[in-house]
Structures are given as C-alpha cells and as structure tokens.
Amino acid sequence: MSDRSDETSELGGGTTESGIDPVTLEVFRNQLESVAEEMGQTLIRGAYSPNIKERRDCSTALFDADGRMVAQAEHIPVHLGAMPEAVAAVRKLEPEPGDVYALNDPFTGGTHLPDVTLVSPVAPEGDVIGYAVSRAHHADVGGMAPGSMPAGAREIYQEGLRIPPTKLVEDGDPVADVLELLLSNVRNAGERRGDLQAQLAANQRAETRLGDLLEEHGTGQVIEGFDAVIDYSRSRVESEIDGLPDGEFEARDVLEGDGVSDEDVPIHATVTIDGSRVDVDFGGTAAQVPGNVNAPLSVAKSAVYFVVRCVTDPEIPPNHGCYEPVTVRAPEGSLLNPRPPAAVVGGNVETSQRITDVTFLALAQAAPDRVPAQGQGTMNNLTIGARDGSFTYYETIGGGFGARSDRDGMDGVQVGMTNTLNTPVESIETEYPMWIERYALRPDSGGVGRFRGGLGLERVVTVESDATVSLLSERRRYAPSGVAGGGNGATGENSIDGDPVPAKTTVEIEAGTTVTVRTPGGGGHGDPDERTSQSLAADVADEKQTDERRDPTNTD
C-alpha cells in the first residue's frame, strides 16, 4: 500500500510531513476516530450502571506503540487529557498481546479512584502496534462513604481501593483472583463487574477494528497514518499559537475550601506564549492541602490542554500533536502536584474546573474575543448511596455557560472539564429508591450583559431510604465573573430538608429526606444597556443550533 500512497501524493498536489497526501490523511483521521467512537459506543451499550450507560461518564481513545494518542472519542476532557500518563505507566511493564491492565492510582497514571482505566496492547497481526484505552467512572470503588466521593477525606486510603497498573487479563484469559480481589472491596460488586466487562469489550472492539484497517491499508501505511495525524494536529496548533501575541500573562483564583477547612485555596498561573509554544507554570499555587481537592499533575495538564484547544481551534483533531507545543509545570508537593497519600477525589472534578478558569483568565489577556465570561465553574457532584451497597447514585449537575462576545451563554449545560449527560428522571426513579421532586432552570441566574450568562439548574431529590449523601461543589461563595461590563452569575446553593449545607459535605440521612442542589449561572458579557434586538436574535439562533445538536432539557 505504500506504493499507492506515493502515487496519490504525486496526483494530490502535496503531502504532509509524514509523506501522506491530504486526502489519504483525512481518510485515516476519520477511520481512526471511528475506532475510538465505536469503542465508546460498545462501552456505553454494554455498561450496567446508569452512570455510564445514561450519563456517559466514560472515555475511549487509541494510542500508538510509542504511547502517543492518535485518536479519541468526543467524551470527557478531564479523562482524555490525562490518559497518556496511564499508558506510560502500563508501557513500563512491557505488556504482551492478550494482556489487559487495570489502574486507578492517581500517583501512577490515574486521575481519581472512581475513574478505572483499562489499557490493552493492540496486536491484530501479532506485533503490538498500539494501545486501546477505556476510562470509566465507577459508581463505587470502596472507601469511607458510598460512592467513593467523601467530602471529608484526609488521605487517599479513605477514598477507595487504590489500583496500581495490575494485570486483569493475561494472554486473553481473565486473572480471576485479581478480579475477585477488586470486587471484594467495592459496593454493588455485580454492577462493577458488568461495567468492567463493558470496558473489556470496548478495548477488544479496538483490536477488531484496527485489524480491519491493517487488512485494508497494510501495517506500514497505518503506522504512517498514526504519524501523519499527529504531525497535522501539531502543525495546526503551532500555527494557531503563533498567531497569538507573545508575552507573559498571569491570573489567580481560589477554591472555596478543601472539605476540611473553609479557608480559600489559591491557584496561580503564569502563561508564557513564545512563538508557537505555550508554557503554563502554576508556581505560587497553594501547597497540597489536608482535604481532597488536591489534583495530580495529569489533571492539571488535562485542564490546560483543554483550554489551549478552546482558544486555538477546537476543530483541530485532538491527539498527541495538540499536546506537544504545551508545557505544564507545578511545584512538587503543591495543590496541583501533590505527594501521596494526599486525598485527591475532589481534585479531578472541582480543582480541574478552577484550573480551567484560571488558565482562561490568563489567556484572555492575549485573546480576549476567544474567551467567554466564566461559566458555573463546578461539577456539582451529588452522590447518594446505601451503606449496605444496595445502590449508589452519582451525578454531576449542569449549570450556566458564560456569555460569549457575540451570543448568550447556554442554559443548564456541563461546563469546562466534563461533558456528560444528565441521568434521566425515569432512569433515576426506576434504578434507585429516589423521587425527583423538581428539575428545572433557575430563572435570572445568568449574569446580565449585552449577552447574558446561561442559567443554572435546580434539582430536588427525595431519598426513600436511609442513605449517605456526599456533596462536592464550588461557586457557593464567589460568583462566576462577567466580563467587559457584564454581571456575575448567581452562586450555587445546597440544602437538605430546606437547611443550607456546606459546599463540601458528607452526611447521613433518614428515609424521606429531600436534597436540593441549585447550580450557578454563567457570567454576562458586555454592558447590559447595549442589549439589543440584534443580541436577542443571536441568542435565538444559538438556542436553535443547540436544540438541533441536543435537547438541553435532557442533558446537563
């Protein structure tokens, strides 16, 4: 097939750095991305837990033999940007064809303990040519509280079962004692087993589909295709960065406590743009804290990669090439590069959001028209589960998206580092002993402006059995900021039976208790006095586009 590639290059009017003509490159890009997407569909359809099959709190990707991401499904940003660390950890163990490794250890390639990653060498013809990777948020992995998202954890051992890269399948056969060890340390083991089996099926799907590509194109050209898509993305990102003004840009924000103390926890970023490269240094950020909002460096990298993609061109194919021009640093022992046994479960979900906000604030100084007002800045994590393991419900609840320079912010959507759907009311009331009393947009919660911020949501849940409730949330004290004269979005609120509770808390409740989460709105953009019919028309057009893409009343 290499002869065909050379012939096409001569006829196609130019080639990439890897020697593949643009038409063939586009074919490869779409085929590789379809492999990752099919992996994701296999995982979602095969999963047992509503958290994966309904909310789609999972991600899949394909890597080459050198551990470089070549394609990903459009899933969860905080999962995908951190995946290379997991592949690197497994590659050190020199896996063989037919092996599958599981891991969730944040200090050895993971993000936080509920996110279990499976890494499989892909070898359709006998030699390893890449790795299939699936990452899924399991509704429980043990620990001190059902759902494994305890607000008061002070060390990682309290958060759940910690899995370093461990062989789950060897030469095609499950390692039964390892699987039983894992399942013996989690609640609702049957559901966990089903979700792991769905991940295994997703990874196997990658091997099957990649085998089809090898048969179609030949091994040599497929490997050239890996290089070509990475080279293309790197070139595109470098060109976009080169179009930004050089300079050093700083920004600072805070987390509203760490779950142990309510004291603000500062995050400081210095973004340096130099030609076609971006360096982000988190020096000046707080030291690691006693609570669980510490974030592994892989999470910080993931957040920065996401922001750089947003500020350059989100349509650039996401792969290793997008990451190469970006450097991310944080002092060892800091909030964003903690030493074990730091608690980290909130770092992945809440601190990642604030890293995103801070990096956007810094880059807004270089590209103000490309950065929206602040969105809700939190995932509003709500976990409800029984001590006996009979059920565990986990949800991240959407809120307001910040207004853009040319249109209103979106209402009731996930913002920043997550990209999940909501759990439908029908599914919740069927799967769990829970009743949804109210699920609606919060009127007037978006910041005013020429373009208003998106509206937050209100979710009211009555729990019909004794349970443990954990809340991990932010933007309950400090509102999402508007820009260019726009107003701030509304802060969020949490309450149990009508009584306010802290942003981060774990409490025991009795049957019949009602839990209410009101999520923040987005900040506004521009002077409210300049809001015109033109502004409203742009808003209507944006809402129509959103409706065509997905129904915002059925997603977070």
Image: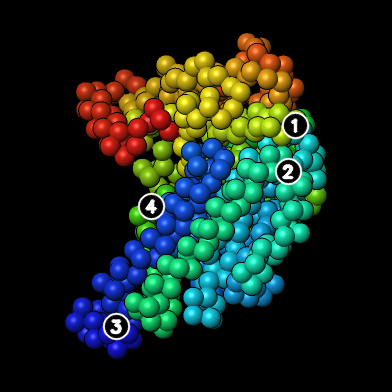
Q: Secondary structure at mark 4?
A: loop
Q: Position of residue 391 (x, y in %)?
A: 65, 32
> Circles 3 and 4: CB distance less than 8 Å?
no
Q: Amino acid at mark 2?
A: Val
Q: Is residue 428 above or below residue 290?
A: above
> Circles 4 and 1: CB distance less than 8 Å?
no
Q: CA distance from mark 4 to mark 1?
A: 44 Å
Is residue 234 at least partly visible in the picture? no
Q: Amino acid at mark 3?
A: Ser
Q: Which dot, 2 or 4, sits closer to the camera?
A: 2
Write down the residue under mark 3.
5
Write down the residue under mark 4.
314
Q: CA distance from mark 1 to mark 3?
A: 60 Å
Q: Position of residue 515 (x, y in %)?
A: 61, 18
Work out whether residue 92 or residue 202 is closer to the camera in this orientation and state it. Answer: 202
Work out whether residue 283 or residue 345 is closer to the camera in this orientation and state it. Answer: 345
Q: CA distance from mark 2 to mark 3?
A: 51 Å
- State the image quarter where residue 380 is shown: top right
Sequence-earlier tag: 1 or 3: 3
Q: Which dot, 3 or 4, sits closer to the camera?
A: 3
Q: Which dot, 4 or 1, sits closer to the camera?
A: 1
Write the residue at 71% across / 63% down.
175
10 Å crowding of disc 4: few (<14), some (14-19), many (20+): few
Write down the residue under mark 2.
186
